Image (spheres, helix red, strand yellow):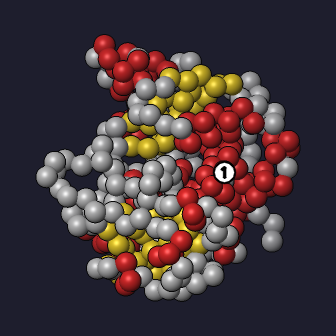
């Protein structure tokens, strides 16, 4: 695995390899503090970011690599002068050993990969995908449930433009016995492409017409905010479901609440102390998973020698 631009291309074996490394990192971060010493990684962000950018840059430094960064490159870098993304990649790869890219174009990661001579990680591409968010989402599910196989998950909110949900669904489809309940605001339902993708992977997808259609014993609820910055229909009236202590009380004690954040006002603060609310821990899992991903790709791309699942001694 030499790049990570879509959750659609990774195998279950590769995913488990990365999670094995992430588990090891959680046990002892110091073990990896010089793992990539001497390397330089560029974070190239054309859209605003807090959690993704900072967790990537923290991960890079915890691995011992140096980071060079451009924030809001759409306005503050050569793109404002008219430089194409492809030319920017051609230049930045001469300064770095890996590029982590966030861009407003759905096809940005593929465009970058088409000219890149260094590894590319997609840190969010328009309304398409956010594969590293999916990486930490599934890791969190695995951590709290002990396994991913047999998981039931309700996905709520903007399922049309919600790139975090898109990547999470692609990754969870690698596991067996998955049931997904989709509950969205009208006009922002999950696109047919993803429904067909899930069906092909034998994932059971159930479209819910009301919040009460979600089973009370579902394992996880994954809520997403409406991507107002991507909605093209200015006349679309948005009525979002806000989770609070009162309506979340209908779910079982073993139903966990996930959110890729920012929650804005979609999860009331009265749920923060509920033991089932794990969205802040979910965000913090961005460090071990992104560290593991970077380390894993470097080992493959630069032949540093990582042990793969299929070669691991049983």
Q: Where's residue 22, x and y in %?
A: 72, 54
Taking the spot 56% from the left edge, 18% from the top edge, the residue there is 95
Tell me the residue at 49%/68% (across/down): 244
> What residue lies at 77% left-to-right and 63% top-to-bottom?
312
Q: Is residue 234 left or right of residue 200?
A: left
- Which x, y percent locates residue 262? 49, 49
Rendering quarter of residue 114: top left
Residue 63 seen in the current view: yes
Nearest the eye: 22 or 127: 127
Identity of the residue drawn at 50% across and 75% down: 246
- Could you tell me which quadrant the C terminus lies in? bottom right
Count of numbered circles on the image = 1
| Residue 9 appears in view | no
Identify the element where label 1 is drawn.
Answer: helix
x then y, percent, for residue 17 = 68, 59
**Mark 1: few, some, or many residues within 10 Å (few <14, many ≥20)?**
some
Q: Does residue 298 appear left or right of residue 187 in this picture?
A: right
Residue 57 vertical placement versus 225 (above, below) = above
In the rendering, at what x and y percent does residue 117 appear? Answer: 50, 30
| Furthest residue toward top | 81
Q: Which residue is label 1 attached to?
A: 284
Q: Residue furthest left?
A: 235
Q: Is residue 280 above or below residue 180?
A: above
């Amino acid at each position: 695995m030499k790049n990570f631009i879509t959750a659609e291309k990774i195998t279950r074996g590769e995913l488990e390899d990365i999670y094995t490394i992430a588990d090891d990192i959680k046990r002892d971060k110091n073990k990896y503090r010089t793992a990539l010493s001497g390397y330089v990684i560029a974070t190239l962000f054309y859209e605003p970011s807090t959690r993704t950018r900072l967790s990537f840059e923290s991960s890079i430094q915890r691995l011992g690599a140096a980071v060079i960064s451009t924030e809001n490159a759409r306005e503050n870098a050569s793109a404002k002068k008219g430089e194409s993304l492809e030319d920017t990649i051609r230049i930045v790869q001469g300064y770095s050993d890996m590029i982590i890219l966030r861009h407003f174009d759905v096809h940005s990661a593929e465009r970058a990969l088409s000219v890149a001579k260094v590894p590319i990680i997609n840190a969010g591409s328009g309304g398409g995908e956010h594969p590293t968010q999916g990486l930490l989402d599934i890791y969190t599910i695995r951590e709290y449930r002990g396994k991913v196989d047999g998981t039931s998950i309700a996905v709520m909110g903007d399922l049309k433009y919600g790139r975090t949900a898109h990547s999470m669904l692609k990754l969870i489809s690698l596991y067996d016995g998955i049931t997904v309940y989709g509950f969205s605001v009208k006009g922002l339902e999950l696109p047919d492409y993803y429904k067909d993708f899930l069906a092909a992977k034998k994932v059971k997808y159930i479209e819910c017409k009301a919040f009460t259609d979600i089973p009370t014993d579902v394992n996880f609820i994954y809520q997403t905010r409406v991507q107002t910055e991507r909605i093209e229909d200015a006349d679309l009236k948005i009525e979002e479901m806000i989770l609070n202590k009162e309506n979340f009380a209908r779910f079982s004690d073993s139903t966990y609440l996930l959110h890729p954040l920012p929650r804005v006002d979609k999860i009331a603060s009265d749920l923060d102390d509920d033991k089932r609310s794990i969205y802040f821990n979910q965000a913090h899992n961005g460090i071990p998973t992104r560290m593991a991903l970077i380390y894993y790709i470097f080992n493959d791309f630069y032949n540093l020698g990582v042990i793969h699942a299929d070669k691991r001694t049983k």
